[in-house]
Amino acid sequence: MTVLPLDGEHDPVRREIIAAINRLLAGTPHRSNGRLNVSQLAIEADVKRWHLTHQHTDLKDRFQEEVARTEAKRAASAKISDAYEDLKRENAELRQHVRHLESRLEIYATALNQLALEQAALSGRDADAAKVRTLPRRRQPLP
């Protein structure tokens, strides 16, 4: 990943700084620990820090802009990833809830079917009506 081109640069110090910027932003440092700050850029470019802060401020500023842009992309990607994981978890919870509701629905359908058969038997619409007996209702005790 080349962020800054080396074309048109004849100053060897600027070329080293640009090459170091490109390596750091690509995640392939040679001399530094890879952190994206001006101190590590100076180490990576093998120049004194003051070269960046006093002589080549345009490169320092460009590096900091690219770092900010990279960090913003990384934060957005992490946010999208977190949202995706939340949606996956929510989907799993909803699927579990649907399975629970489907099992309850099966129980209720069985109970309703049984009640319909009993009602048909009690009303005399069924030949097996003699097999079903009504139970006496319990009376509520008076207060």
Image (cartoon, helix red, strand yellow):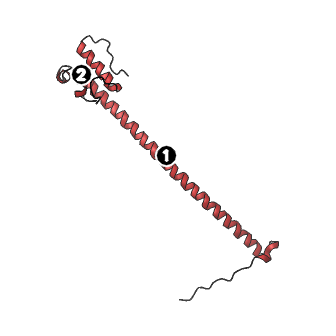
Label 2 crowding class (10 Å Cα cut-off): few <14, some 14-19, many 20+?
Answer: few
Label 1 crowding class (10 Å Cα cut-off): few <14, some 14-19, many 20+?
Answer: few
Identified by mark 2, the residue type is: Asp
Is any atom of residue 17 visible in this view?
yes
Element marked by disc 1: helix
Is any atom of residue 124 visible in this view?
no
Residue 68, horizontal then vertical, whole percent: 30, 31
Residue 108, horizontal then vertical, whole percent: 64, 64
Residue at image x 66%, y 63%? 109
Residue closest to the eye, 106 or 116: 106
Give me the C-alpha separation between circle 1 and circle 2: 45 Å
Identified by mark 1, the residue type is: Lys
Question: Quick check: marks 1 and 2 in contact, CB under 8 Å?
Answer: no
Residue at image x 31%, y 27%? 66
Q: Is residue 11 above or below residue 133?
A: above
Element marked by disc 2: helix
Q: Quadrant of residue 32?
A: top left
Q: Quadrant of residue 46?
A: top left
Residue with the mark numbered 2: 58
Q: Is residue 72 left or right of residue 135?
A: left
Lower position in the chain sequence, tag 1 or tag 2: 2
Residue closest to the eye, 142 or 43: 43
Residue 42, horizontal then vertical, whole percent: 23, 24
Q: Is residue 108 above or below residue 40?
A: below
Q: Is residue 104 left or right of residue 87?
A: right
Residue closest to the eye, 4 or 15: 15
Residue 113, horizontal then vertical, whole percent: 70, 66
Q: Nearer the viewer, mark 1 or mark 2?
A: 1
Residue with the mark numbered 1: 88
